[in-house]
């Protein structure tokens, strides 16, 4: 459980800046200038920083030279220095502007995690020190991505990293907003590089954001979105490099959000492959063996339904989608497996992409699915596989059709219009 | 006060490796190999590491880009990451060799210092955690040069840095020896680059070592020697890169040490200047103003006696020696000072060096001084100024005469012979 502590006085923002935003001395100065302005305007601020872009990879590469399977504890001790460097530099940049500031490691803040080195989970945050700094008018600058375990060992957080640190601090401090500064100005209806009519969303619901994040929108990691939702922390995504309101990810009246356009965005995933194993009953020993194999290789898959809408029959084949980069290692393992167990015929399709309509209450509206398939059909794009849920309708297509598909769907569902 | 804790069982060594010794992955592997061998032979070891060579300077340079007068607290937060990187990498290298090892920050060891950021002094060391690791057969790898202050802020130690950490741990753990691994095989009678007949000393007394260190022998910083002497820690200086016994710096029977050759080594200091102010009584207001000026500029000086052996008169001039690099800033300040106070005539002599006979009971033996001046005179080297103490006889000469002087004295005092 997170300890909560109410702050009196002006508005409090927890602001997280990623590796690109603090990737050079020049960029640190840009951020410091912006923070100094906000401080002068009376905002209370807690900063959370990532390591300077490239630093974490540099450190991992050093470790890999010694031991590609180095212990997770020592890797955490090593890479946590990246954030310690950026927070110290930011403190100097703020102090030079006359702003009182203090850099703090995860240990100094007392960000307690479990002992899962490399993918630790925050268990509690002690706000006493942070609150006392804020009361003294000092801007705390906290190292993201790190904490300490019950033994006092340095840990790094799992996926979501510094975003999760920011959300946890915002929750514990009851901040008015947790602001995630990135290199894009907010959440868009789809990737503006693919469709220039893509529109920045002023507001998005948590569930939809979560789905967008899971489906590959890079602005936020799903784990930090879930964390924010759980602790009811208002999240905002903004650009570090240009002014703007960004996108507010809002909890609150779910029914009100549902009133909004049911399709709110189009998410994409590239570099995927599908694997179908014919004649494989889900109850069989072979199926269990396949699942065990996927778990062992730590391959994230999504099980999907082959698009045979008119056939009503027991599922006799299993299809799933995985990152193209993982195909070869999986095939190798399956080959080993097939020496002792007949897996049946394997069908591998590479260079696939997934395009997803994201919104609320989508599964109930069968017409949406039909419309989606129609739009794609009109563009002679073959939708190969389907996956649906309350908040998304996904289809797998050839990667070379991706841009065409996104533009057609974005237009057909009028996502460029408010 | 240091907490002391006795260890049972095999011999315990605290081993410190400097930046050059851990300056690359290759060198870290070399050290790890050596530590692994010692571990297999049953030694108990605590490692203390500096940052990889160049890393600390890289970090200071980053800070200087933001603010050349960055706060000492934030500089310590920044540069302490250097040691954290090298200890994590060393732990990985040992673990890959099957040696149980754990990296520890100054905070994790509980190396308590005062709050003098950038030049903190160790106040206590908690040995409980280290001892428990040793009892479990785990090699603790401690970040040198760092500690925490009473507020939990990261501090870095003053001059002597990681050597002082090693001595403090050796004292607290009552280690059998504190071994300082450097890039030279020990302490020599003089610089082997100047006189190839220079001989490595097997043993040297603390007082003599301290004098050597103060006079510019680079192997150990005087502060760590003093610290070792105070806590009666046997110190040994060895090479990281070649096998050998190194030099043991030994406390113990002072009279026995005094029985050894009275002159034990020749120390040198280069890049010096002398400044003489004529007609300046030490009791005068002007003299006080001069001292205040030196203190303000934090210039270390050594006051010396002009070599006018036959004159018996009140001292009417003040001479002192300082680093050549500090001359210009001092002259500038003295010029400002002279606007309000007549300082008299200034004589500046640059490109000076100091050559010192180092040993025990030297002041009592007037013959040594005469012999020294004779040797130099025979080489037509003009000894300009003298400074004597119980453990050294120093003279200032032209820097261009330095090598000739060292070789002549080394030969005349038979330092090449055991």
Image (cartoon, coloured by chain):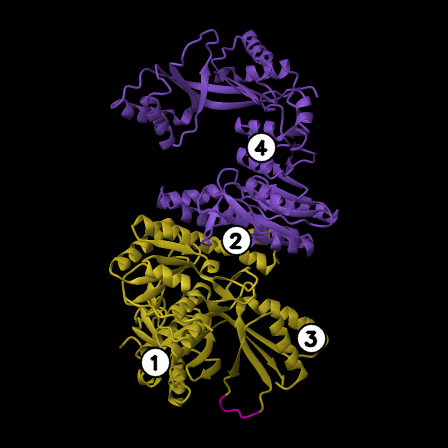
Chain colours: A yellow, B purple
Image coordinates of residue B136 in percent, x first then y, are 68, 57
Check whether the beta carbons of the residues at disc 2 and disc 3 lie within 8 A of each other: no
Are the numbered discs 2 and 4 placed on the same chain, yes or no? Answer: yes
Q: Few, some or many C-alpha atoms within 10 Å of disc 2 (few <14, some 14-19, many ≥20)?
A: many
The part of the chain drawn in magenta is A309-313
Q: Is residue B218 left or right of residue A255?
A: right
Name the image quarter holding residue B367: top right
Which label sits in the foreground, 2 or 1?
2
- Name the mark on residue A252: 1
- Name the mark on residue B219: 4
Question: Whole-Å distance between the Cαs marked 2 and 1?
Answer: 43 Å
Check whether the beta carbons of the residues at disc 2 and disc 1 lie within 8 A of each other: no
Q: Is residue A203 magenta?
A: no
Q: Classify B257 as above or below A219.
A: above
Are the numbered discs 4 and 1 placed on the same chain, yes or no? Answer: no
Q: Few, some or many C-alpha atoms within 10 Å of disc 4 (few <14, some 14-19, many ≥20)?
A: many
- Name the mark on residue B107: 2
Residue visible at 66% across and 78% down? A289
Residue visible at 69% across and 36% down? B243
Image coordinates of residue A67 in percent, x first then y, are 62, 54
Check whether the beta carbons of the residues at disc 1 and disc 3 lie within 8 A of each other: no
Q: Classify B237 as above or below B173.
A: above
Which label sits in the foreground, 2 or 4?
2
Which quadrant of the figure contains the C terminus of chain A?
bottom left
């Amino acid at each position: 459980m997170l300890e909560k502590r109410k702050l009196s006085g002006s508005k409090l923002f927890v602001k997280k800046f990623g590796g690109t935003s603090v990737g050079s001395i020049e960029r640190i100065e840009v951020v410091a200038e912006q923070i100094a302005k906000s401080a002068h305007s009376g905002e209370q601020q807690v900063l959370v920083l990532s390591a300077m872009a490239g630093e974490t990879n540099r450190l991992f590469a050093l470790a890999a030279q010694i031991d590609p399977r180095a212990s997770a504890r020592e890797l955490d001790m090593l890479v946590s220095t990246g954030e310690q460097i950026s927070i110290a530099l930011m403190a100097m940049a703020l102090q030079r502007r006359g702003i009182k500031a203090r850099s703090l490691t995860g240990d100094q803040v007392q960000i307690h995690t479990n002992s899962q080195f490399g993918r630790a989970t925050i268990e509690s945050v002690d706000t006493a020190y942070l609150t006392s700094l804020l009361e003294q008018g000092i801007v705390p600058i906290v190292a993201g991505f790190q904490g300490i375990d019950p033994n006092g060992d340095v840990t790094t957080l799992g996926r979501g990293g510094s975003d999760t640190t920011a959300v946890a601090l915002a929750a514990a401090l009851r901040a008015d907003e947790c602001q995630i500064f990135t290199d894009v100005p907010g959440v868009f209806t789809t990737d503006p590089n693919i469709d220039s009519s893509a529109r920045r969303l002023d507001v998005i619901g948590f569930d939809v954001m979560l789905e967008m994040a899971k489906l590959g929108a890079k602005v936020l990691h799903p784990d930090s979105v879930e964390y924010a939702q759980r602790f009811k922390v208002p999240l905002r995504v903004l650009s570090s490099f240009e002014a703007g309101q960004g996108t507010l990810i809002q909890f609150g009246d779910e029914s009100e959000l549902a009133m909004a356009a049911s399709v709110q965005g189009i998410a994409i995933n590239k570099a995927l492959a599908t694997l179908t194993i014919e004649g494989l009953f889900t109850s069989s020993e072979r199926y269990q063996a396949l699942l065990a194999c996927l778990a062992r290789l730590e391959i994230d898959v999504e099980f999907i339904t082959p698009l045979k809408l008119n056939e009503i029959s027991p599922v006799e084949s299993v299809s799933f989608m995985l990152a193209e980069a993982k195909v070869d290692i999986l095939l190798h393992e399956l080959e080993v497996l097939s020496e002792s167990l007949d897996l049946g015929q394997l069908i591998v399709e590479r260079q696939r992409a997934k395009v997803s309509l994201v919104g609320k209450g989508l599964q109930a509206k069968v017409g949406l699915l039909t419309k989606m398939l129609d739009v794609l059909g009109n563009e002679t794009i073959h939708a190969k596989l389907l996956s649906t849920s309350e908040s998304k309708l996904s289809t797998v297509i050839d990667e070379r059709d991706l841009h065409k598909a996104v533009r057609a769907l974005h237009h057909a569902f009028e996502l460029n219009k408010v």
